[in-house]
Amino acid sequence: MKRVMKHRLFWPVVALVSLILINTVARSQFASITVRDDRLYGALIDILRQSAPLMLVSLGMTIVIATRGIDLSVGAVMAVSGAVALTIIDDATDPNSLGTVLVAVGAAVLVSLLLGGWNGFLVAALGIQPIIATLVLMLAGRGVALLITEGFITTVNSTPFSFISTGYVLLLPFAFFIWLAVVAAVGVIERRTALGVLTEAVGINPEASRLAGVRSRGIIWSAYAASAVLAGIAGVIYASNIRAADANAAGQFIELYAILAVVLGGTSLMGGKFSIAGTVVGVLIIQTLESTVLFLGVPSAQSPVFFAIVVVVVVIIQSPSLHRVVRNVFRGTRSGGTGEPTSDVEAAR
Amino acid sequence: MPADNEVSPIVAMRGITISFPGVLALDDVNFFLRPGEVHSLMGENGAGKSTLIKALTGVYAIDSGSIDVTGTSQVFRGTSDAEAAGISTVYQEINLCTNLSVGENVMLGHEPRKGGRIDWKAVHRMAAAHLESLGISVDTRSLLSNHSIAIQQLVAISRAMVLDAKVLVLDEPTSSLDRGEVEQLFTVIRDLRDKGAAILFVSHFLDQVYEISDRITVLRNGKLVGEYRVKDLPREDLVNKMIGRVLDDLEAIASTSARVIDRSETPILNVTDVGRRGVLEPADLSVFDGEIVGIAGLLGSGRTELVRLLYGADRADSGNIEVGGTAVKMTSPRQAIDHRIAFSSEDRRAEGIVSDLTVAENIVLGLQARKGFRRINPSKQESVVAEYMAALDVRPADPNMIAGNLSGGNQQKVLIARWLATAPELLILDEPTRGIDVGTKAELQRKVAELSEKGLSVIFISSELEEVLRLAQRVVVMRDRKCIGELDSQRLELDDLIDFIANQGTGSAA
């Protein structure tokens, strides 16, 4: 039990499970899943489907944060990516052809990669502080998106394109498989190669890493590129969901939710050690919370307040200082107790 | 146990026990500090000195035991509790805000106010006064980061004095100071002691301990060995108590300085006129196969600057570098590493150890960086890590321990292991023995000697000239950011070297 509690995913998972339990207690059909037309339906399935954009963005954010950076431009990249994809489909003679959609998605991801390259250039090559460097694109990106769509909200009717977000495969939403595949890919790339540990080394101690011969510039660059590519895919999924490229609404505030997801998942904003599984749990917590707001029928005017309160509670549940206080209370009752350093952070100093 | 009881202690720590996961860092330790005394805490790396200090200064909570300050029992929940009780600390690694001015640092948290606003004029006036009493005159409005480590250390000490502390804890305050600065500090310490302050002093320099202390407490492996008056404890006894075995290690190291080096072949590294404006005047240096070249000079003489330039850590703006007879460009550490040059920085914490990674990850970092993204296969990694942890005797011998939790000496071993694992032909060691206990120091020196006998070339920088003389076959002397000479260390006496450093060339003391 103690080993389980020490695991760094313990508290995030506790928060996620309690959220689901609270919902189920409030209205029992929350947890129910039904099969209709070879598809699973239910609030939990919706969460899996709807979490795709935030999941992708948060994964990228995790890598960037691990390098001691931050990427504020992800929402704007989503907008650009959606605009590129929809403009291509809109201009195509046959919006329903699979080829058109593939070209559109490919182009959107490529443009995102360029944007990520720009961010990486500012941070890694010019040494601009990440928050400022990515702020540039955060502010300019939506303008670029509007330029691409010529100021309109481009809408399309394309069956293959809609499938990305609303289609089902093997009973489950296609979007779920997308993020599952991306999580697996990121996991393999970071943990099966040395990229993950080198990224952490750069994030923890950039100078020591440089002197040890780590190509930190390339690693930082690749983190921003990855973040933008993932945001680009997220932008495609978002656009597919609403069948439109809305340069202003696409990915609005998503950078903040992504940062929240990363932190809820136990990755420090100070960089270094990161947890992909933690980010997955963090995103699911946020998405479950979004559903809770809808499901419990919180009036829309009050929903941000409700959301904020729950987030505060979740963060408090995970706080090491609270754990220490609780432990001390317990220790007081069983005199003596086992000695532990006040916290890992302090012990490391 | 105290030899006399005429002065009652101002700090009494009794039965202190602290454990970390898997380690009993302190085991039932008693420690007493008396007013008007300088008390040295001695022990090898990992003996529990730092832990005891951190318990006293409120960084760590104690698991059992009691701390009394001026007769009242205290429970420290944080450093501010300890400060409020009158205990001020200057840590080994300087904990100041380098992005603030000198004056702001000295007065941080205690700024004089006028009408609710900080009176900046008074801040700088008072800071200047505090610094003045340490005999330092610097512009208090200048950025702290623009000053040398030595000045930063003195600023940290004057900051502790601002708090008007009854107890001053100095953890390795002299490790970055040159001789004159140490004298300056000791004058201040004696002055504070005579005014009735209790001073806890930790240093690895035995000379300094004997020069300044009135009393010594020795710890070993987390346990108290004893408390002694300095006059009752000869050095050999102290070292024996610290190490727990009779040891003449430092004497026993076979001196390698007399080894004959074949200098007829092409040098492994040949540097001509390498310099950088404002940092280092153009300097020459050559290192031959299996040779240990020492660089001697005071702090700030350009020793570190020279090796950083030839390692590519900083860019040189003049000169040529030849590796094995071929001219090369050295614009980044990567290039140096590709030419089989390794550099272990003097600043372990900022430029060496990656503190949140494990010992194993730290050791393979250099190897992994050279290999690129393809991961070293786990069984090979395991064997490399095991090999070098054993070779350098890293303790505790747990490859999965977080490197930041190791003691300073063991962190140094991990760094040397990192470089040896990359199989370098030239190893640059910048102050590898700073802040390390006698036993580990001897171990490291023996290791360097052994490696050089197997053909590794070494550039060895140390403030401890005995060390340089014992190991190096040739000594390059630097002063005021330039090379002032090169000496054959075989017939070189310590006093001659000191004299050379101080007087050669200019005829005046540096």
Image (cartoon, rainbow, N blue to C red):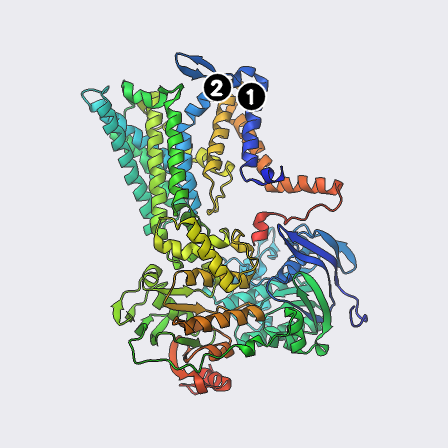
What chain letter is assigned to the residue under label 2? Answer: A
Which residue is the extreme one toward the top?
A37
Q: Residues within 10 Å of mark 1 (few under 14, many from 20)?
A: many
x and y percentages locating residue A24 in the rendered image: 56, 19
Residue A212 seen in the figure: yes
Q: Residue at x 74, y 55 (%)?
A: B65
Does residue B433 appear to the left or right of B459 in the view shown?
right
Is the residue under label 2 in contact with that under label 1 (CB below 8 Å)? yes
In the foreground, A89 or B486: B486
Residue at 67% x, 39% y: name it: A326
Q: Tell me the tag on residue A23.
A: 1
**Circle 1: element type:** helix
Depicted B454 relative to depicted A220: above or below: below
Q: Which residue is mark 2?
A: A43
Sequence-first disc among 1 and 2: 1
Q: Is residue B116 left or right of residue B231?
A: left
Tell me the kind of residue under disc 1.
Asn
Q: CA distance from mark 1 to mark 2?
A: 10 Å
Q: Dot 1 falls on which chain?
A: A
* Residue B246, x across and y down, in percent: 64, 74
Q: Is residue A251 visible?
A: no
Question: Residue A225 placed where, x, y %?
Answer: 33, 41
Q: Which residue is painted at 42% across and 43% down in the image?
A: A191
What kind of element bears circle 2?
Answer: helix
User: Where on the picture, by quarter, is residue A78?
Assistant: top left
Instruction: Write down the quadrant of residue A173 in the picture.
Output: top left
Q: Quadrant of the N terminus of chain B?
A: bottom right
